[in-house]
Image: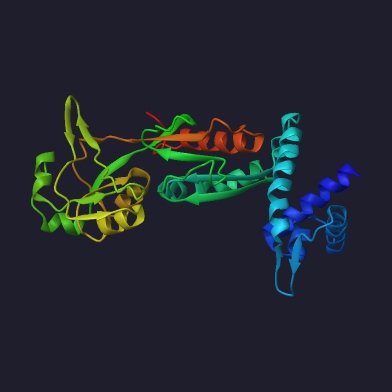
Amino acid sequence: MALDRLEAMRAFCRIVEIGSFGGAAESLGLAKTTVSGQIQTLELLLGIKLLHRTTRKVSPTTEGAAYYLRARAVLEDVDDLEASVSLSRSAARGRVHIEMPAAVGLLLVVPALREFTVQYPNIHLDIGCSDRVVDLVEEGIDCAIRGGVVTDPNLVCKIIGQVQLALCASPHYLREAPSLSAPDDLFQHRNLGYRFSANNRRYLPTMFRDDEAFNLDVPVSMYFNNGSAYTAATVAGLGIAFVPRAEAQPLIDQGLLTEVLPDWRLEAITLSLVYPYTRHLSARVRAVTDWVSDLMHRNQFWKND
């Protein structure tokens, strides 16, 4: 009976997540009539209606939505228990919500996701890609990748990589602009600035060459708070910008961008993996965090020097 209850809970959660009995049944490898019977039995046992059913959509009732949150937590605990005593990678299962900067998601994680799904076929990911700083506890997020210094004392923080930067401009811009052979020359150029969307703070990296250092606190003609727009503006010839090396290098290879002052090295942005102190790091979350850490370590543009 206990196993039947767990399977019924699993079927209910899958219906809520997919939005249909047919889709849930297919993903569980069961007949639709079996899933329908499980839900009817569960509703009878609980004495409440869990789902609103229409010809077009299935959605949870108010009581069903509350039950879903508790049921999913129970199922995740059961899955973690089974994974902890299993030697098989594929034993880790459940849903993991991870947030990361857009550049990390678009340039590194998303292109490699097929590798992850092969290694962990039973882990389902909710991936948020944005530059906002989320409240992990309040928003129910399992873990996040953060750029820069992490100061929140409520978070466990582990440095896993870095964003390497390249100072770039389009060939068209450089043909029409003044000569550029030293950092001080940047004061005579159109420079593009980047602000963090969370706090509107301007990011000012430092350039290094041997024992010399130069902070890129130069006049800015245009600001952006979105990395894709910032890079697009650079390619469009609007000025000079520091672009993630992972994004810049293919554009340099295609002749769309040119690296300027290449004998100077730009300060990299540290990337850390964070999760709440109060949250147990489950087998499924550990699988995700270990994979992301290893992915960065294997990539020349993201690993720590």
Q: Examine the rendered structure and indicate whether residue 70 appears above or below residue 291.
A: below
Does the rendering let one see residue 282?
yes
Left or right relative to 277: residue 257 = left
Residue at (50, 50) in percent of width and height: 128
Nearer to the camera, 165 or 78: 78
**Residue sticking out furthest to the bottom:** 55
Q: Position of residue 234 (x, y in %)?
A: 25, 55
Q: Position of residue 51 (x, y in %)?
A: 75, 63
Q: Quadrant of residue 239?
A: bottom left
Q: Quadrant of residue 181?
A: top left
Left or right relative to 61: residue 134 = left
Residue at (56, 47) in percent of width and height: 113
Nearer to the camera, 87 or 51: 51
Left or right relative to 152: residue 66 = right
Image quarter of the N terminus: top right
Q: Position of residue 302 (x, y in %)?
A: 41, 37
Nearer to the camera, 6 or 145: 6
Nearer to the camera, 95 or 154: 154
**Residue sticking out furthest to the top:** 211
Residue at (27, 49) in percent of width and height: 194
Does the rendering let one see residue 182?
no
Image quarter of the C terminus: top left
Q: Position of residue 289 (x, y in %)?
A: 55, 36
Left or right relative to 168: residue 69 = right
